[in-house]
Image: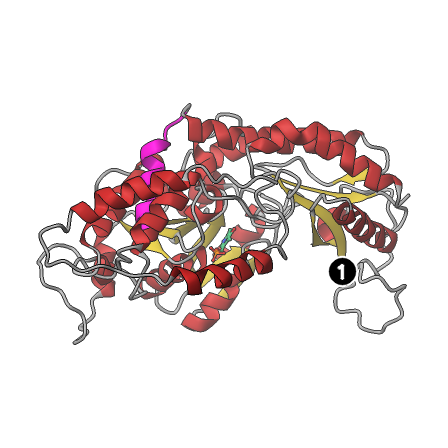
């Protein structure tokens, strides 16, 4: 695997430009002891070999995507000043860049200048803010999310001491609208979290139907699009997903992770609020904060204090190069990921040794190794995962509830030992007996489409060894 090394030269040129901006100061040289650093850096390189090859197309497992070279370079360039976007004093230029980058994301979702938003260290902290605001606006009411929503929602509501309501999912892992309405009738739900792109199976909750329910029942809608948000730009979504994304602008708050599909290094989530008045909820009076200007400091509208200015700089640079426009290069990259997932699903559906679940709505595919019983499916899927890994092809596994799988696999006997933990049952545990281990692949790199033939060949060869 060749990691791209040529762009390092661009970094040096840009650094020279950056330092010229501070030429008026008394001479001061930052120093680095190269002799001491070199061997440590070599140790780091050796240690880092013990990783899965995330940038390579043969890594088609978890939700990992390499940052764009421009993001990597801009982030590193910014590190030489290491701005802190908590306050304008800590990161004047990078705060301005953050506001521009976040406005572009809001614009992608159809929001104009009237919004409030900022970057965060991750999707979890971004969701924490959205749920915190939701709880403040609907005190005493619960927050509802589907059984396939990100696991952190239940935990975050616990931390916020807000009651949590779990909504059932349909056979496609989407929020079940009938169950949602049934629970809304109680009047106890204040906020519904709609996941546009679940982390497990890439399922898109029917936001259009959730919005229709909002006419009958009053509640707030938070869209968790940490993984799926950027697919709003893709031109090859199925009708259901398109309908959901097309009403995202009616949400009260949205979370999207630039460090998932936005080509950013980790440390970059984003939360957006449609009504900027929620900014009042954040009011604080910290004696430490060093506000020396009357302009809006991002620290005044963020739960977190210190945040990496470099993350904002990297995002700004990436959006400069690849604007968030329909039909643009960035959008085409997402469409290619989705096309790769559709094609992978088609190939698995054609392979008589495999069982598919539902067609991908975004770019995550779920399938399993065929067998007669759920327990054998779990064991065999795990074995296929292991055989592929030995061949250098990295997939993922996931446990799916049997209730979700039953309608898809009428011929399978659900023998209640589907946990795929490698033993033959009788361990008396029973805690995971209602799940089946399936294979999962995130086709998150545009290159996956070109590599599909090779990935399939490697897969089929590994698959042969399992039977
Ligand atoms: C990844 C993800 C999260 C959590 O985001 P982090 O950036 O990992 O903290 C929340 N919700 C969804 C739907 C996700 O995919």
Side of 251 relative to 280 (left or right): right
Q: Residue at x 63, y 57 (%)?
A: 50
Q: Position of residue 229 (x, y in %)?
A: 45, 42
Q: Residues within 10 Å of mark 1 (few under 14, many from 20)?
A: some
Front in this rendered view, residue 213 or 239: 239
Front in this rendered view, residue 145 or 113: 113
Q: Residue at x 28, y 46 (%)?
A: 15
Side of 165 relative to 214 (left or right): right
Which residues make up the magenta segment?
312-326
Q: Is residue 115 visible?
A: no
Tell me the residue that label 1 is attached to.
Answer: 434
Q: Quadrant of the N terminus?
A: top right
Q: Quadrant of the C terminus?
A: top right
Front in this rendered view, residue 360 or 347: 347
Q: Residue at x 72, y 41 (%)?
A: 357
- Residue 415 image-quadrant placement: bottom right
- Magenta span contains residue 378: no
Q: Residue furthest front?
A: 35
Number of numbered callouts drawn: 1
Q: Is mark 1 within 8 Å of ligand 1?
A: no
Report the predominant secondary structure element of the magenta stretch: helix
State whether residue 299 is above or below residue 393: below
């Amino acid at each position: 695997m060749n990691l791209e090394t040529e762009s390092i030269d661009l970094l040096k040129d840009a650094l020279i430009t950056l330092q010229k901006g501070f030429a008026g100061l008394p001479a001061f040289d930052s120093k680095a002891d190269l002799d001491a650093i070199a061997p440590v850096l070599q140790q780091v390189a050796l240690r880092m070999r013990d990783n899965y090859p995330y940038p390579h197309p043969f890594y088609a497992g978890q939700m990992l995507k390499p940052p764009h070279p421009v993001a990597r370079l801009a982030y590193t360039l910014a590190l030489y000043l290491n701005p802190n976007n908590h306050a304008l004093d800590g990161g004047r230029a990078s705060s301005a860049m953050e506001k521009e980058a976040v406005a572009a994301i809001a614009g992608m979702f159809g929001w104009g200048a009237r919004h409030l938003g900022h970057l965060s260290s991750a999707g979890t902290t971004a969701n924490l803010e959205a749920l915190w605001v939701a709880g403040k606006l609907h005190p005493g009411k619960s927050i509802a999310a589907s059984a396939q929503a990100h696991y952190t929602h239940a935990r975050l509501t616990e931390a916020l001491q807000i009651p949590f309501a779990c909504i059932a999912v349909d056979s496609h892992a989407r929020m079940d609208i009938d169950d949602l309405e049934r629970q809304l009738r109680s009047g106890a739900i204040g906020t519904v979290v709609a996941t546009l792109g679940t982390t497990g199976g890439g399922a898109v909750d029917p936001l259009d139907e959730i919005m229709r329910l909002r006419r009958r029942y009053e509640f707030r809608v938070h869209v968790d699009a940490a993984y799926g948000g950027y697919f709003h730009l893709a031109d090859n979504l199925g009708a259901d997903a398109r309908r959901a994304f097309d009403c995202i602008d009616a949400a009260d708050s949205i979370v999207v992770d630039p460090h998932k599909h936005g080509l950013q290094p980790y440390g970059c989530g984003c939360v957006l609020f449609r009504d900027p008045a929620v900014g009042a909820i954040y009011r604080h009076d910290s004696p430490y904060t060093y506000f020396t200007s009357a302009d809006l400091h991002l620290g005044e509208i963020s739960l977190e204090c210190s945040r990496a200015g470099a993350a904002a700089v990297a995002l700004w640079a990436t959006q400069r190069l690849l604007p968030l426009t329909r039909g643009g290069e960035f959008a085409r990259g997402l469409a290619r990921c989705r096309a790769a997932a559709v094609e992978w699903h088609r190939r698995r559906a054609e392979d008589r040794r495999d069982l598919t679940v539902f067609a991908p709505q975004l770019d995550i595919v779920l399938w399993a190794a065929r067998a007669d019983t759920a327990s054998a499916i779990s064991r065999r899927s795990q074995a296929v995962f292991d055989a592929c890994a030995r061949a250098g092809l990295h997939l993922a596994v996931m446990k799916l509830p049997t209730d979700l799988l039953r309608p898809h696999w009428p011929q399978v006997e659900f023998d209640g030992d589907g946990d795929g933990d490698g033993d033959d049952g009788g361990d008396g545990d029973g805690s995971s007996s209602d799940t089946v281990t399936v294979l999962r692949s995130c086709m998150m790199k545009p290159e996956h489409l070109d590599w599909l033939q090779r990935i399939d060949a490697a897969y089929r060869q590994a698959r042969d060894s399992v039977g």
